Image (cartoon, rainbow, N blue to C red):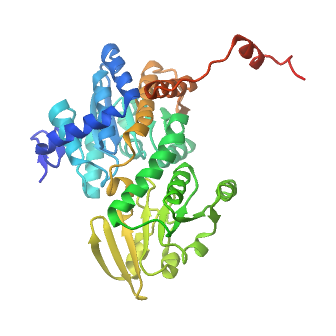
Amino acid sequence: MTATSPRLKHEVKDLALAPLGRQRIEWAGREMPVLRQIRDRFAQEKPFAGIRLVACCHVTTETANLAIALKAGGADAVLIASNPLSTQDDVAACLVTDYEIPVFAIKGEDNETYSRHVQIALDHRPNIIIDDGCDVVATLVKERQQQLADIIGTTEETTTGIVRLRAMFKDGVLTFPAINVNDADTKHFFDNRYGTGQSTLDGIIRATNILLAGKTVVVVGYGWCGKGTALRARGLGANVIVTEIDPIKAIEAVMDGFRVLPMAEAAPLGDLFITVTGNKHVIRGEHFDVMKDGAIVCNSGHFDIEIDLVALGDKAKEVKTVRPFTEEYRLQNGKSVVVLGEGRLINLAAAEGHPSAVMDMSFANQALGCEYLIKNKGKLEPGIHAIPTEVDQEIARLKLQAMGIKVDTLTPEQIEYMNSWTSGT
């Protein structure tokens, strides 16, 4: 049942879930010391006072800690889901009940509801947009041109969203600054690699309870997410095959000890297929035709387009749910293909997403990226901007400090040498 206030101040599954959500948010917060320090500073300085902010993110315990930090900083914030299957309903309820943050997110919401929530978010007339996949920004540009004057800027969390922003900039429709959070070193080196690697396999195991040791796992794409997924699968005893279109990444996969094949050759060999490319239909009809009986396919890229489920559905004579988030497609040729999480992000559909410790750095980047936009209002050109190096370094410093790890510092002699061109052999 959906709990909806008369003025649509929120739309969540059940406000009675809030106590459980609060426990889980607080538990996640223990592993997010960097964001906690930023929240404490925000509470003192109020950098977002008078700012209307929309966050379109996976509504998880980690996102909740980000939302709480932004509100502590004075933001008038609204939170919506960035994926129909990624919401944790108890978390959404807690944010509404205990923190008075308007949330519009329900796990399993249909596409119509998802689109309506994007429109509700834009009704807030945001000055800052935190996006994860670029849906809010794209809708703003396509349908709400009259609101562009309100926008100070946006921050983008994921690779797919950055691809869309670059296409928008190339087409001349990105008329405000966008902070590329995804490519910050303290984001993609850790979140994409270690977070995606662990949480993807967590989701697969929860959905299927299969033993990965001895299985042939095909990882489709060897970007940072693919690297982490392949590494973790091998660590659990799987025989890993990588497919790639980029020759440099393919060489890297080979030198990392993985077998690299085209998808046409990998398709008959795999027991489990994991897509992490951000591209469309990387597993297609011709691949399903030659897969083993009972092959499992799933996606850990942002959108549900990497696996061609329409082609698979056309080949199926029967589709049935065999476990939660696990559907078996019985094909005309007598074999079956198993799809996890409706082809959506398996780590959030069947599990809890990335561990809090790694999201600590990612959401620190989001929080500080938003603050950077405010501090530089009117100074940044339209287009895509990197997180400043000094911000990236400060996040890493705070993380090390919280972990009790110390590093060396340069001596005056070393600083002089590194800034000189006259010394040498």
Look at 33% across and 19% down and name the residue there. Answer: 40
Q: Closer to the camera, 375 or 32? A: 32
Look at 51% across and 26% down and name the residue there. Answer: 405
Quadrant of the image containing the C terminus: top right
Can you say whether 96 is above or below 349 in the image? Answer: above
Question: Where's residue 395, x and y in %?
Answer: 48, 27
Quadrant of the image containing the N terminus: bottom left
Question: Where's residue 53, x and y in %?
Answer: 32, 31
Question: Where's residue 123, x and y in %?
Answer: 26, 37
Number of numbered labels in the structure image:
0
Can you say whether 251 is above or below 370 in the image? Answer: below
Question: Where's residue 193, x and y in %?
Answer: 51, 47
Can you say whether 325 is above or below 18 in the image? Answer: below
Q: Closer to the camera, 34 or 279? A: 34
Look at 65% across and 59% down and name the residue there. Answer: 257
Q: Hey, which residue is sitting farthest bottom in the picture? A: 333
Look at 28% across and 76% down and name the residue there. Answer: 320
